[in-house]
Amino acid sequence: MSSVQLQNLDGVFVLPAEKNFRAAAMYADWNPASGFYEILTNQPGADSWPITGATFILMHRSPANPRQALEVLKFFDWAYTYGGDMALALDYVPLPESVAALVKASWKAHIKGSDGQTVFNVK
């Protein structure tokens, strides 16, 4: 299959490759204050592919069913911890570990049951 080189924000021409998608995610400013909403188009970094996107999962901060929410969060915790190789096999790029750690910390801080206790307390 033919592919094209594109010029990224740093002025470097790069190919669409896993390492360049990973670079775009790595150099992004994943600010937890914005709910991790980040457009990965034109991220800095000499290796960054300029057209990269992320998939987001939305969770209620006060879930109606905290036990069910915990099971969902446990799945994503497992995926962040152990699913990287499977993601790559499916042509997805796992989030950088530092970003996954920020996301997990956000779950503990912001997703709470009606009693005010954190739903996600898995270490």
Image (cartoon, helix red, strand yellow):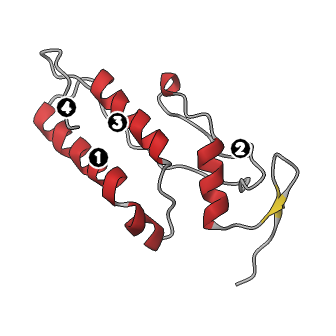
Residue 106: assigned label: none
Screen quadrant of the C terminus = top left
| Residue in front for this viewpoint, 114 or 74 | 74
Q: Position of residue 9 (x, y in %)?
A: 81, 46
Amino acid type at mark 2 = Gln
* Residue at the disc numbered 1: 77
Query: Is residue 52 in view from this perspective?
Result: yes
Residue 43: assigned label: 2
Q: Earlier in the sequence, mark 3 or mark 1?
A: 1
Marks 2,1: beta carbons within 8 A: no
Circle 2 sits in a helix, a strand or a loop, which is it?
loop
Specify few, some or many for label 3: CA neighbours under 10 Å numbering under 14, 14-19, or 20 or more.
some
* Residue at the disc numbered 4: 121
Residue at 49% in and 63% down? 92
Circle 1 sits in a helix, a strand or a loop, which is it?
helix
Q: CA distance from mark 2 to mark 1?
A: 26 Å
| Residue lying farthest to the top in this orientation | 116
In this rendering, position of residue 66 left or right of residue 13: left
